[in-house]
Image (cartoon, grey):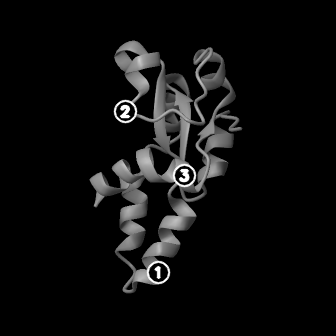
Amino acid sequence: MSDYLRNSSDVVVGDIRPRRTSVAATHLSRDVDLSKATWHGQPKFDRGLKLLMFEHVSPVSQIREERRTTSTVDEILLILWRNLRVAWITKEENKALTKLGYDSRRPTPLRAYAEAGILLT
């Protein structure tokens, strides 16, 4: 399940809802339009994957756990619609989320990003 969620995020999510980008990631990416960039394309503009992260705003493990509480396809689709969002952030911003305890659990994802000082556009 986790692999399906990760892979769909790279391909499908960008078509359904725009990829978000932190202000800091935008500055680091220089001339790359991160709203169209995918994880698979990252090595072309971030050699060695040293600067940026293609992050699930709601962690995949959290989405997977919430899915386990459902029994119908409609409920699963609603969970995916609410939670399957991705954002480009910097490695430093990701460390800030982790330091605050938001590595695999973010009850209120956008609040977690705000607490970590991450401004998404």
Q: Residue 27 in the image: state x and y as whole percent.
A: 66, 18
Seen in the image, is 29 located left or right of residue 74?
right
Q: Amino acid at mark 1?
A: Glu
Where does the C terminus fall, quadrant-wise? top right
Marks 2 and 3 sit apart, C-alpha to C-alpha, by 15 Å
- In the rendered structure, find residue 15 and report the number of the disc placed on it: 3
Q: Secondary structure at mark 2?
A: loop
Vertical position of residue 9 compared to residue 71: above or below: above
Q: Residue furthest bottom?
A: 72
Which residue is painted at 39% across and 53% down in the image?
8
Which residue is painted at 68% across and 41% down in the image?
114
Residue closest to the eye, 86 or 15: 15
Q: Secondary structure at mark 3?
A: helix
- In the rendered structure, find residue 40 and report the number of the disc placed on it: 2
Q: Quadrant of residue 42?
A: top left
Q: Residue 118 in the image: state x and y as whole percent.
A: 65, 34
Marks 2 and 1 sit apart, C-alpha to C-alpha, by 30 Å
Question: Which dot, 1 or 3, sits closer to the camera?
Answer: 3
Question: Which dot, 2 or 3, sits closer to the camera?
Answer: 3
